[in-house]
Amino acid sequence: MISFDSKNMTFRLETPNSTYAIFVNERGYIGHAYFGAKAGDDDLSYCARPKEYFYSENPVFREKSSFLDYFPQELPTDGLGDFRQSALALCDDQGHNAVELKYKSHTITKGTKALPGLPAVFGTADDSSTLEITATDDILGAEVILVYTIFEELDAIIRSVKIKNNGSKNLFIKKALSLALDIDDDNFDIITLHGSWARERHIDRHLIHMGKQGVSSNRGETSHQEHPFIALLDHTATYDSGRVYGINFIYSGNFIADVEKSQFNNLRAVMGINPENFCWKLEPGQTFDTPQAVLVYSDSGLNAMSRTFHDLYRDHLIRSPYKKAARPILINNWEATYFDFNTDKLIDIASEASKDGIEMLVMDDGWFGKRNFDDNSLGDWTVNENKIQGGLKHLVDEVNKLGMKFGIWFEPEMISPDSDLYRAHPDWAIQISGREPGMSRQQLVLDITRKEVEDHTYESVAKILRSANIEYVKWDMNRQLTDIGSADLPADRIGEFYHRYVLAVYRLQERLITEFPNLLLENCSGGGARFDPGMFFYSPQIWCSDDTDAIERLAIQEGTALIYPLSTMGAHVSVCPNHAIGRVTPFKTRGYVALSGTFGYELDITKLPPEERAMIPGQVALYKRFSDLVRNGDYSRIASYSENNEFDCWASIAKDKSKALVTVVQVLYRANYKSRFIKIKGLKPEATYTISWPDENSKDFPPLKLTGRTLAAAGIPIRRDWGDFQAKLIFIEENK
Ligand code: GLA
């Protein structure tokens, strides 16, 4: 619920377990009064009053810079005395940097607001409401609208900012962040997710120190390296206890996520489009919308934060018809064949896979142009009939005859210098004229911000999809952006390029899912460099990482699941030694880890050792039995190998608490450790549950019966198996 108290000029945003309060002071400054556990029915403006110290002492407005440097602003601006990290910087046509926002009006409406060209959460008049506070800087002629959306059932506040030029001269937006949050420090830690190629989203946690700290991307995409997520949390907070403020960004390009601990021991967190290399020219009458940022509060640890993000994204951001539905179990030929395949090879793989219950063949990179290696043909999206003998439709029809769906790989945003497309349109590659553009994976990037390039790119993909019964697309993006130059952008607009690029990616994918509404779209970027909520608006799943090793995947999937639902995590079983890192793990463990994602295979099934091959039908059956629970249940992290150096454990618990699937992976076996107890929180205390081991011999693993209360308190005994990399599945079901 959102309410406004006109006497005290205070707004309250109430979610089930949190209160967010905004206060407008006598001079029109919009202050942040409170965000945290549910507050009583008091006027919360008093929380911001002490921070007006220098200002309220004297009715004459003379200590403005001292005031601004302490006051908790909802949208801190630049140039007039708040020296902390700002969220908005506007420059006039004379080059002056100063913005001062004063409250003008507000509206409170039911439902959510769409953002033109950008992903945005959606809801109905019954489940959501939106507050828009309009502020102005009359000297600049700028109108700035602070937009807040909440959902009745979720402890989340979704923020964005709209900037309008109501004046008669150009404005230049040098910084337009989506969110700022000022809170007092209470010895908080910060969590970020860092990584690299094949090692995405590892959790990093440390105490917040004085000054600025944070993460960012200037790579043109979200990136493998850092992630648009920070959590500020009690130093003692765990998965199940303590205060957590989680912040995430619904965007797929350059970002910053910073927190600054200031001289007064206050924290200011900000998140938004990275201002580095950003400058947006706003002509009179034009409007600029920032992407949305999401703030989640939990006073019961990280698991509750994760569940809020998962529910928000599953219910209010993912639009695909597959959002809640089972995904076809796929087999992808990348790690099976790399570029060395033809129609016969693919049909061999598909026909063997279909015997084991696998439901879709995905043809990865190498089917087009003359591509037998990664140094050519991107942009030439014509089927290579020397490899795909009989043509694409023939292949798809043959795969369909096996009862399987067919999926295909594209990397639409790219252009190889060795391609017919480049020979015809060398200027279509992103480049600075007069400077040889830098290569990465032997390719350049198409300037899809240009309308003709966007249209050509769309048609290249769409014409292939129109030519056969293709039901899935893996949309890849295998390099980051450099040499930013565009034939269509004048000097005073080149700072818009990165954002325009992201908007073009969104437009392309919007066109695709509009023309092919039943398409299952999976995004990918050299593994998981575009695993972000922006892409959820277009695709219900994203390839998590090029590292398919089950043990490396533990930390990657743990970091990913901290914010994103398991239903979105592309995860496959591959062969050993693992291609990325050479580790050998049991086939069973590889299966269990992939079962916590979208599940599929990425191997040559025709060459699999017979004992591994024999396990596939059993894994398919496990997926069929449990995937609904995994996709739509509540995720709960129970133990983390990165903390205990021994084992990982997580659960998916049905929303009605009638069942749960627990996965335990013993990474390292320690001599003479015999058993351990796993405590399962979140079930019904008074209900009795049967605990079984669905993939084990029931003579060795007889079922147990325990109440939910005992499961949370004493837990389930887990026998430790001899050897590293062992895994167990446990199924818990209520006795009715
Ligand atoms: C990227 C993807 C892989 C595969 C290759 C093909 O690395 O992440 O899954 O599709 O490209 O070139």
Image: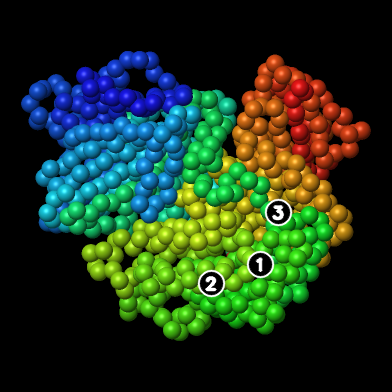
The residue singled out by tag 3 in the image is: 329
**Residue that numbered label 2 is attached to:** 463
Disc 2 marks a residue whose amino acid type is Lys
Q: Quadrant of ligand 1?
A: bottom right
Q: Which is more toward the observer, 723 or 381?
A: 381
The residue to which callout 1 is attached is 363
Tell me: residue 654, above or below residue 588.
Answer: above
- Kindly state the secondary structure of the residue where label 2 is placed: helix
Query: Which one is nearer the viewer's eye here, 593 or 577?
Result: 593
Judged left or right of residue 635, residue 93 is left
Q: Are marks 2 and 1 in contact (CB under 8 Å)?
A: no
Say which residue appears at 49% left-offset and 25% top-offset. 299
Label 2: how many residues lie within 10 Å, few (<14), some (14-19) or many (20+)?
A: few
Vertical placement of residue 466 versus 259, above or below = below
Between 576 and 364, the one lying in front of the other is 364
Question: Residue 547 appears in which quarter of the rendering?
Answer: bottom right
Labels 3 and 2 touching (C-beta < 8 A) = no
Position of residue 593 measured from the top left corner of the image (x, y, whole percent)? 70, 46
